[in-house]
Image (cartoon, coloured by chain):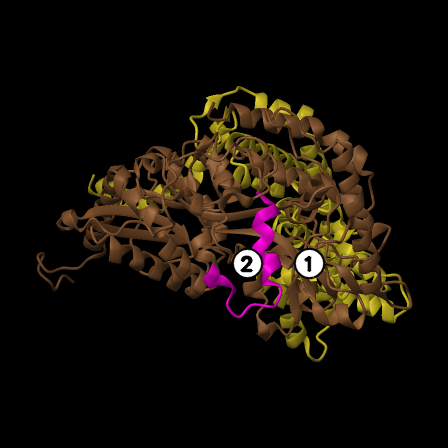
Amino acid sequence: MRVMTRAYRLTRRNLIRVASLAAIGGAGSVVVASCAAPPPTPSPKPAAPAEAPKPAPTTAPPPPTTAAAPAPTATSAAPAPQPTPTAAAKPVAAAPAAGAAQKVPLSVFYWANDAGDLAIWKEQIALVGQRQAQLDVKFDTATFDNYHDKLLTMAGAGTLPDVIMDNGFRVSSLAARGVTKSLMPYISKESGFDLNDFVKPAQEMGSHKGEIHCLFYDFVGLLPFYNVDLFDAAGVPHPDASWTWDDFVARMKQLTKAGPDGRVTQAGIVLTKDFVWGLTPFILQNGGELWDKDLKESLLGSPESLEAITFYADLRNKHKVTLAEVPGLGEYTDPFLSKRAAWINHVVAAASGMGPEKGVNWDWGVMPRQKKQVTWAAGSGWAMSGKPKEPDGAWLFVKEITSSPNLTAIAKSQRGYPARYSAMPAYFQGRPKHVEYAKSVMEYARGYPTHPTFLEWWDVLNRELEPALLGSAAPKDVVSKIKPELDNLLAKSRQIGS
Amino acid sequence: MRRGSRSRSEALAAFLFLLPNTLCFLFLGIFPVLASFSLSFFDWPVLEAPQFVGIDNYARLILEDDIFISALINTLYFVGVVVPLTVMVAMALAMLLNLGLRGTLLFRAVFFFPVLCSPVATSLVWKWMYNTDFGLINYLLRSAGLPAPDWLVSLTWAMPALIIMAAWHGAGFNMVILLAGLQNIPRQLYEAAEIDGAGAWHRFVHVTLPMLSPTLFFVVVIAVIQSFQVFDQAFVMTEGGPGKATTTIVYYLYQHGFKWFHMGYASAIAWVLFVVLFGLTLAQVSLQARWVHYE
C-alpha cells in the first residue's frame, strides 16, 4: 500500500540513507578536524587561579642576601644567578603605553584549586593588565593535582602556552627537558629589574644549571607550629632558638600522654612518612646532604644523614613521642588541628589552613638545631615555556605578575608568602605573636635542592625509608640497599638535557 | 536479482550503522592497545623522542626489577585471598536472601549499596576506620579487649586491610549475580533430592553447587580479572606502602606511566599483566569442564 509519492516517502531505507550520509559526513568532519593544526592556545577562561599553599617569610626589609644558604647541591641549587642588580626595589616599570594599540596575544596556563584561588589569580592578571594593556591574555587552568599531567601532555603534543606556572620541586625537571626557558637573557636586558628583591633561596630553587627559569610569587620556609595551650598545660617552655635535639626530645616527652595500655593519646610531634617534609630538615640540621655537588652520589649513607634518619625514626619507635599512625602529606595536619599533637613542622603558608575557625591556639616556633640552624624553603612561580610564540610578551607577563605590587596583593590576600622582600610586610598583619620566627626563616633556610629526576627520587625514598621509620628495618641497611638506585637516578639527571 | 540487490543494500545499511561505533572502537580501543604494545619496545619519557630498546623493558621488568616482582607477589596475594573471600561472602549472602525471609528486599539493597559507592570515597572512609590511634575498627577491637593492629602502617596488616575492604566492596555485585543463579535452579530438583533423603548439606553440594556452577564460573572469572586490576585502594589508602607492602601491578604501572612518565616501561608492565590475566583466564576456561555443569 504505497500511499505516499516517491518524493515524500519516509521508508526505512530512506531513513537509513539519510542517517548513513549524516554519519559519513560527521565522521569525515571529525577526521578532517583532527588532522588540522592544533589550536594555537589554551582555551580562555575567566578568572584567575592559584596554586596550593606555600609558605612564607619575612616582613623584614630587604636584607637580601642574609640567607645562610649552605651550598645548595646539584643542578637547581647552582649558585644564584647574577643578573643586573639595580637600584631600589621599585615595582617593575610601568606600562610602555606607547605601543598599546598593538595587542600581544598571550597564552597562560596555571593551576587553581577552588573559586578563591581563581578570584585571586583573576585579580593578579587584572593588575598586570592595568600596567600592560597591550597584553591580550588568554588563560587556561587546572587543579594542582591535574596540572602537571596536562602540562606534560601539552609539552608532548607541542602545544605549550607562552607562560606557565611552575612549582619549585619541578623547576629542574621541566627546565632540563626544555619545557621552560631560561629567563636570564631577559633579566639581563632589564635595567630596572631588581632580582635581589627575590629571596635568595628562591633564586636558587628557581634556577637550573645557574640560569633562572622560574620567578617565584611565593616562597616559604619549613618551621614548627606549636599548640600554645598544650605547651602551657604541660608546663613546657615555648620553643626558641636555643633548643637542641636533646631539648626537643625531652620536651616532646613532657607533652606526650599515653593511655593505660601505653598507647599514645596525645603526641608531642606529628611525624610524616614524607621524606621532604619529615626527614629532610633533620638531615640538614645534622650536617648531612642529600647528594654531592656533582650529582654523582647519594649521601644519605653518610654518618650525619644516617644519624638523622635514626633520630627521626626513634621519635616514634624509641621515644614514643608521636602517634602510631604516620600520615602522608594528605592527612599530615589532622593530628595537630584535632589537638592530638602539640608540634608540627610545616611551611609558613600552612597558616592559611589553620585559621581561628579551627580552634587551635598556635604559634610559630624555631626549629631545634643540632650541628646547624637550617631548614628548607620552597615555593611556586611563573616561567616562560620552552618555545613561546610571544617571548617578549611572555617575559613582560612573568615580570609583571611577579612584581612587587602583585606580590603585595598576594600577601594581603594571604594566598601565599611573597617571594619578594618588598612585599613581605603585608603578609603578617594580624598574625600570632611570634611572627619574627616566621620572618627569620629565610635567614637560615635554603631552597630545597632538586634535579631532573627528583620526583622519582622522592618517591623512591618515601617507599624505601618507610619500613625504617616504622621500626621494621635498620636505616643503615635500607640506605645501603637503595644507594645504587638513587645513584642511578642521579646519573639519569646528569644526562637529561645535557 | 532484485532480492540480491536488496540484501546487499541492507548489508550496506547495517555496516553504515555499525560504522560510528566501529570507528570509535578502532580509534579508542584497538589503536591504543596496539600503540601500547608498540610503545613497550621503546623508551619514551613523553618529552623526548621515543628510542627503540627492543625487549629491554621486558627483560628489565622480569629479570631485574625487584619492585615489579614484589608488586606481582602482592597482587597474587590480593587476588588469591580476595576472590575466594568475596565469592564465599557473596554466596552466603545470596543463599540467605534466597530463603525469602522478611526484609529480603531491604537487605539486598543494603548489601549491594557498597557497589554503588565510588571506590575512592569508600577508600577514604575505610582509611579513617583503619586509623591505628583513633579509628573505629581499633576502637571496637580495644573495647572488646582484643589486640588492635596498626593496619595501614603495618607491613603485615596493610594488605589484609585492603583485602577486607575490597571484599566488602565487591561482595554485593557477586551476590546479585549468584542470587539470580540460585533463583533459576528448578525447585523440583530440591524436592527430588529431599524425597531421596538428602539433607541440607547434600542438597547444597549435589544440587545447588552443580546447578550454580556456570554462574560461579562467570563470577570467578570476572572477580579474578577485577582483582588483578586493584588500584584505587592502594592509591588512596596506602600509596603502595608501607614500603612496598601494598604496591600492586597496576599501582606500579601508574607510577611509571603517570608519575615518572616512563611510558614504554609502563606499557611493558601492562602487557605482562595482560599475559598473566589471559593465561589465567585460559586456564580457567580449560579447567571449567571439570567442575562447571551446563544443563
Which residue is farthest front? A87
Element class at badge 1: strand
The mark tally for this picture is: 2
Chain that is brown in the image: A
> In which quadrant of the rendered view does residue A187 lie?
top left
Element class at badge 2: helix
Asked if B283 appears above or below A242 in the picture, the reply is: above
Taking A415 as reference, is B13 left or right?
Answer: left
Taking B128 as reference, is A234 left or right?
Answer: right
Q: Position of residue A162 (x, y in %)?
A: 31, 42
- Which residue is disc 1 drawn over? A344
Whether discs 1 and 2 lie on one chain: the answer is yes
Magenta range is A425-446
Q: Colour of chain B?
A: yellow
B192 falls in the magenta region: no
Question: Toward the viewer: A288 or A244?
Answer: A244
Which residue is farthest bottom? B102
Subunit under mark 1 = A
SS assignment for the magenta stretch, majority: helix
- Which residue is disc 2 drawn over? A349
Q: Amino acid at mark 1?
A: Ile
Question: Toward the viewer: A405 or A115?
Answer: A405
Please indicate, yes or no, whether residue B289 appears anywhere in the rendered image: no
Asked if B134 appears above or below A497 in the picture, the reply is: below
Question: Toward the viewer: A6 or B69?
Answer: B69
Tag 1 near tag 2, CB within 8 Å: no
